[in-house]
């Protein structure tokens, strides 16, 4: 501190010393609070970065799950379409065989009893 301020405070006796103590205490408290705020801000920034990283990880997993589900759904759809096409072809061939048999003499297909 400036020597003139110190001498002025000492001239006021105990009240001056108490004022000096309050000024000193206030400066120290303010420094400590500034350090605490700085530490709190750095901790908050660290937590925000960790949260963003976790969110990106979750988003990546979600996208992968959705993509896998979509590919499975498309695969099932393609299988169903293929089976329907196969069954349609089978039904068409059965129908053509039945229509060919219906042109045969109906008496020739009856068993003799």
Image (cartoon, rainbow, N blue to C red):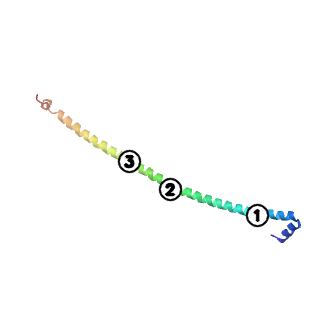
Q: Residue at x 56, y 58 (%)?
A: 50
Please state the horizontal and vertical placement of residue 109, each as a whole percent of the image.
14, 32
Q: Separation of disc 1 and disc 2 at Cα?
A: 45 Å
Q: Are marks 2 and 3 in contact (CB under 8 Å)?
A: no
Q: Residue furthest left?
A: 112
Numbered circle sitting on residue 74: 3
Question: Mark 2, mark 3: which one is toward the viewer?
Answer: 2
Residue hosting label 1: 27
* Residue in the foreground of this view, choosing between 40 and 82: 40
Q: Looking at the rendering, which quadrant does residue 93 occupy?
A: top left
Q: Looking at the rendering, which quadrant does residue 101 occupy?
A: top left
Numbered circle sitting on residue 39: none
Residue 74 horizontal side relative to residue 42, left or right: left
Question: Mark 1, mark 2: which one is toward the viewer?
Answer: 1
- Eyeballing the image, is 87 above or below 111? below
Q: Residue at x 25, y 39 (%)?
A: 92
Please state the horizontal and vertical placement of residue 25, each as a whole percent of the image.
77, 63
| Disc on the earlier residue, 1 or 2 | 1
Please state, as top left, top right, bottom left or bottom right, where the C terminus lies in the image: top left
């Amino acid at each position: 501190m400036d020597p003139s301020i110190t001498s002025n405070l000492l001239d006021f006796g105990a009240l001056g010393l108490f004022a000096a103590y309050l000024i000193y205490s206030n400066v120290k408290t303010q420094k400590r609070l500034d350090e605490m705020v700085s530490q709190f801000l750095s901790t908050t920034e660290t937590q925000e970065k960790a949260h963003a990283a976790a969110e990106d990880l979750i988003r990546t997993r979600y996208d992968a799950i959705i993509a896998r589900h979509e590919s499975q759904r498309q695969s099932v759809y393609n299988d169903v379409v293929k089976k329907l096409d196969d069954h349609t072809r089978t039904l068409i061939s059965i129908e053509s065989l039945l229509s060919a048999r219906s042109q045969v003499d109906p008496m020739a297909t009856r068993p003799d009893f």
